[in-house]
């Protein structure tokens, strides 16, 4: 694992794509993963995979990792999850707010209201729900890093993904503003992951998604960057 001390890293959206690859990479390096996503089946499959690599035990019930299926849009579920994390003594050193969704390619006025809401509720309010229940735990411990997954489209414009761009520009603003509220010892940053071949990229790029790096190729670079963040990075907009 190199010189890094083992950390507890919470990742939202671990069932596929970037979140799953990052969870596997961090666990491989010896870190503890606290994770969540909506798909119970996929969360269970990841738990089994993470536990296999758990040299400490062969049973998933005593794994050092903690995974739950839940929806970031639910404030009450997030509150309960934070309670469980405290009970299990797994308050994260780092939180990666990775769960996200994108609208189907469409001009803004053709995006149904429900789909617009889904993007905003997941990408913006989901992150606020995590921060509401987990940041106070970090403040109490006087340390913690929050990484909010942004996008190149949180810093530039693109046609047909306007709801998504709006949500990611919001995350840049949310991160920079919240950074001004943090006490010393903590940091909140916005991170653009670059371009990676996931379900989300297929949704907006179609078959061209295959031209881009795999989540497995991306994860070691992202892990190194995230593990090396310090309070001095507070308020930064970074790119993997
Ligand atoms: N791939 C790229 O090139 C790229 C570029 C820029 C930014 N990003 C950002 O990186 C992050 C990950 O993207 P990705 O490409 O890995 O996307 P992805 O393959 O579509 O995966 C999204 C993940 O988020 C979870 N998720 C979605 N809605 C959720 C909800 N309401 N509650 C809990 N979990 C939820 C999904 O799990 P369930 O469906 O099981 O809930 C899944 O695990 C996103 O924030 C995205 O905007 C990606």
Image (tube, rainbow, N blue to C red):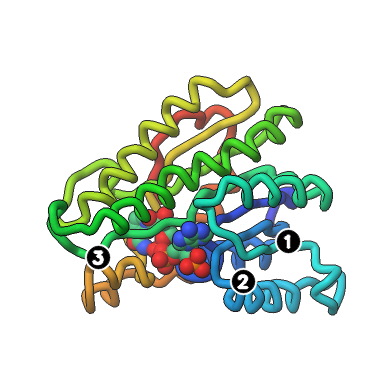
Residue 50 got which mark? Answer: none
| As drawn, 102 above or below 89 | below
Image position of 22 (left or right of 238): right
Where does the image place residue 199, in percent across and percent down from the top left?
A: 37, 72
Front-most of 97 and 70?
A: 70
Residue 18 visible here: no
Q: How far apart, in angstroms, are the residues tagged by discs 1 and 3? A: 32 Å
Q: Quadrant of residue 67?
A: bottom right
Q: Earlier in the sequence, mark 1 or mark 3?
A: 1
Residue at 69% from the left image edge and 51% from the top image edge:
81
Q: Which residue is mark 1?
A: 66
Q: Judge: label 1 CB < 8 Å from ligand 1.
A: no
Residue at 71% from the left image edge and 57% from the top image edge:
31
Q: How far apart, in angstroms, are the residues tagged by discs 3 and 2? A: 25 Å
Q: Which residue is mark 2?
A: 43
Q: Earlier in the sequence, mark 2 or mark 1?
A: 2
Residue 189 visible here: yes
Q: Which residue is mark 3?
A: 104
Label 2 secondary element: helix
Image position of 18 (left or right of 26): left
Label 1 secondary element: strand
Figure disc tally: 3
Where does the image place residue 220, in percent across and percent down from the top left?
A: 53, 62
Residue at 53% from the left image edge and 21% from the top image edge:
181
């Amino acid at each position: 694992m190199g010189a890094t001390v083992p950390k507890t890293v919470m990742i939202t959206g671990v069932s596929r794509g970037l979140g799953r690859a990052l969870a596997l990479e961090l666990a491989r390096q010896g870190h503890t993963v606290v994770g969540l996503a909506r798909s119970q089946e996929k969360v269970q499959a990841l738990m089994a995979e993470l536990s296999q690599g758990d040299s400490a035990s062969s049973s998933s019930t005593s794994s050092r990792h903690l995974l739950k299926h839940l929806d970031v849009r639910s404030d009450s579920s997030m509150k309960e999850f934070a309670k469980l994390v405290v009970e299990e003594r797994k308050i994260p050193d780092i939180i990666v707010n990775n769960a996200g969704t994108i609208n189907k390619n469409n001009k803004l006025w053709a995006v149904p209201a429900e789909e617009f809401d889904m993007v905003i509720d997941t990408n913006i309010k989901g992150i606020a729900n995590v921060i509401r229940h987990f940041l106070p735990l970090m403040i109490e411990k006087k340390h913690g890093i929050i990484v909010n997954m942004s996008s190149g489209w949180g810093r530039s414009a693109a046609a047909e993904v306007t709801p998504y761009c709006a949500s990611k520009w919001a995350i840049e603003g949310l991160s920079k503003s919240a950074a001004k509220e943090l006490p010393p010892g903590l940091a909140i940053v916005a991170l653009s992951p670059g371009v990676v071949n996931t379900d989300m990229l297929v949704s907006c790029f179609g078959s061209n998604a295959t031209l881009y790096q795999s989540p497995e190729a991306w994860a070691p670079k992202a892990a190194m960057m995230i593990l090396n963040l310090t309070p001095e990075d507070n308020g930064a907009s970074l790119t993997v």
